[in-house]
Image (spheres, rainbow, N blue to C red):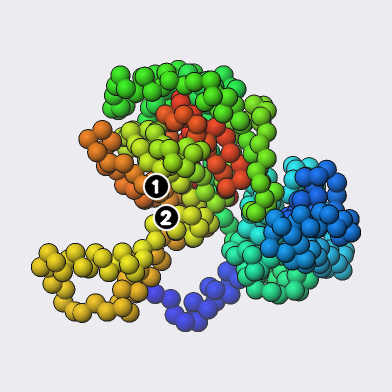
């Protein structure tokens, strides 16, 4: 039905009035600033003492040998502190109570206390700040404090050098206006159906089955194979599963690690109690062997398709937020690849209707690569299989695609499931995980 211009305008005005009536301006009273540790602070922390001054000449000399310049480390540290001070002062001007916490000390207590979470660092700091926020009504914003060293893709400022106080001031002003809209980012819900063997956790008696039957079996308290489970366990499979030596079992007991900064070393805890059955990932999930040269062996089911035996260099599963990162770089097309494909086509005697020059090749790459990215608000996941092995034993499957849920059972020896590049859990023989997108978990 068509609407006349005057009637259409009247309808728009009425909708705007309804939005104004329902609009609740965002005016936070308490904010938490999650700050990354500078590399200088990190080096002092390793020595068991906080950084207070730049007077330790012996340490400065050591840092100068380890990094390009100790003076540069000091400048980057000062820059981080200036950003924190600028954000803090602007919050004070708006009478907003605030707390500053380092990434390592960031906990659920801070999330519960604050109305607004502000990450001060790069994309890694933003992911750390967001991963503890379960309530979708609690916003997280990011300020990129190192525009040279970090892309700041998830931050308000990106790689720009806008003063932090101006950015916070503008954000608070915009958030109080009726036309303001939040950007909702979906997250992947990661549910362990079985922790596997040797992980310091009693294994669950669930089997590789279809996602639907697996969920029904869990509800009914019964676990059994389904009629659609076509995977055949060969003698080689059984032998490989029984061949877990003490070294692998010891490695399996490593439960979780988190890195305080993109450039810093990873600390590993060995407390099996840190493993829970459900996690959230904002960017992506990676599943694969810990040793880069070792092939990952697992069974995978995409949506309600068949369970397929697979060998590869691992799998990544991402949200729209993560689609511009690892997923993009795994799958992106290059001009060199296009040129080589066109050369093969020409040698086969196939002719194109027009001459393909360098500009067209560049456009082909750009259009293909643009399709790899998708909106962070979309309720779908994109998966990528890295370096898949296809032969008579391991059948072909899509090396990339979209899915609403993915079930993976590990047959690996020393593998991990890694969330957003910072949190890792063992994912060895028998471990089984379900990945899903749920709108309410955004």
Q: Position of residue 248 (x, y in %)?
A: 52, 26
Q: Is residue 315 visible?
A: yes
State the residue position of label 2. Answer: 330
Q: Residue furthest left?
A: 349
Query: Camera-side residue: 263 or 47?
Result: 47
State the residue position of label 1. Answer: 386
Q: Position of residue 148 (x, y in %)?
A: 64, 69
Of labels 2 and 1, earlier in sequence is 2
Q: Position of residue 242 (x, y in %)?
A: 42, 18
* Apparent side of residue 186 relative to residue 329 in the rendered image (left or right): right
Residue, x 55% and y 32% (percent of image)?
426
Q: Are marks 2 and 1 in contact (CB under 8 Å)?
A: yes
Q: Is residue 80 visible?
A: no
Query: Taking 310 as reference, is 158 above or below it?
Result: below
SS for callout 2: helix
Query: Taking 391 as reference, is 131 above or below it?
Result: below
The Cα–Cα distance between marks 2 and 1, rounded to whole angstroms, is 7 Å
How many callouts does the rendering have? 2
* Circle 1 Cα neighbour tier, 10 Å, few/some/many (<14 / 14–19 / ≥20): some
Query: Taking 314 as reference, is 123 above or below it?
Result: below
């Amino acid at each position: 039905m068509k609407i006349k211009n005057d009637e259409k305008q009247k309808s728009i005005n009425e909708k705007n009035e309804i939005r104004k009536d329902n609009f609740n301006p965002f005016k936070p009273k308490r904010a938490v600033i999650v700050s990354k540790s500078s590399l200088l602070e990190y080096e002092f922390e390793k020595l068991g003492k906080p950084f207070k001054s730049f007077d330790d000449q012996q340490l400065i000399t050591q840092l100068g040998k380890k990094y390009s310049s100790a003076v540069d480390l000091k400048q980057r540290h000062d820059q981080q502190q200036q950003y924190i001070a600028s954000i803090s002062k602007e919050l004070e001007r708006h009478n907003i109570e605030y707390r500053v916490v380092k990434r390592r000390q960031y906990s659920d207590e801070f999330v519960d206390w604050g109305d607004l979470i502000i990450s001060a660092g790069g994309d890694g700091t933003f992911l750390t700040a967001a991963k503890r926020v379960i309530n979708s009504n609690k916003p997280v914003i990011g300020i990129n404090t190192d525009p040279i060293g970090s892309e700041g893709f998830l931050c308000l400022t990106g790689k720009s050098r806008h003063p932090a106080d101006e950015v916070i001031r503008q954000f608070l002003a915009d958030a109080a206006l009726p036309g303001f809209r939040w950007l909702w980012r979906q997250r992947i819900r990661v549910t362990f159906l079985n922790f596997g063997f040797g992980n310091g956790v009693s294994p669950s008696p669930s089997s590789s089955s279809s996602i639907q039957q697996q969920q029904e079996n869990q509800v009914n308290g019964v676990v059994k194979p389904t009629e659609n489970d076509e995977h055949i366990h060969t003698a080689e499979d059984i032998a490989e599963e029984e061949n877990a030596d003490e070294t692998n079992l010891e490695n399996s007991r490593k439960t979780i690690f988190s890195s305080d900064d993109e450039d810093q070393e990873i600390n590993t805890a060995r407390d099996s109690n840190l493993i829970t059955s459900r996690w959230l990932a904002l960017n992506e999930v990676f599943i694969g062997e810990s040793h880069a040269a070792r092939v990952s062996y697992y069974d995978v089911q995409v949506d309600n398709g068949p369970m397929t035996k697979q060998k590869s260099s691992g799998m990544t599963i991402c949200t729209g937020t993560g689609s511009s990162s690892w997923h993009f770089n795994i799958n992106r097309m290059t001009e060199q690849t296009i040129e080589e494909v066109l050369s093969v086509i020409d040698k086969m005697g196939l002719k194109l209707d027009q001459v393909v020059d360098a500009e067209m090749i560049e456009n082909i790459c750009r259009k293909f690569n643009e399709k790899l990215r998708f909106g962070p608000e979309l309720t779908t996941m994109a998966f990528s299989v890295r370096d898949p092995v296809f032969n008579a034993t391991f059948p072909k499957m899509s090396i990339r695609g979209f899915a609403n849920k993915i079930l993976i059972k590990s047959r690996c020896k020393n593998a991990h499931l890694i969330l957003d590049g910072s949190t890792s859990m063992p994912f060895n023989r028998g471990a089984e995980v379900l990945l899903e997108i749920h709108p309410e978990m955004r």
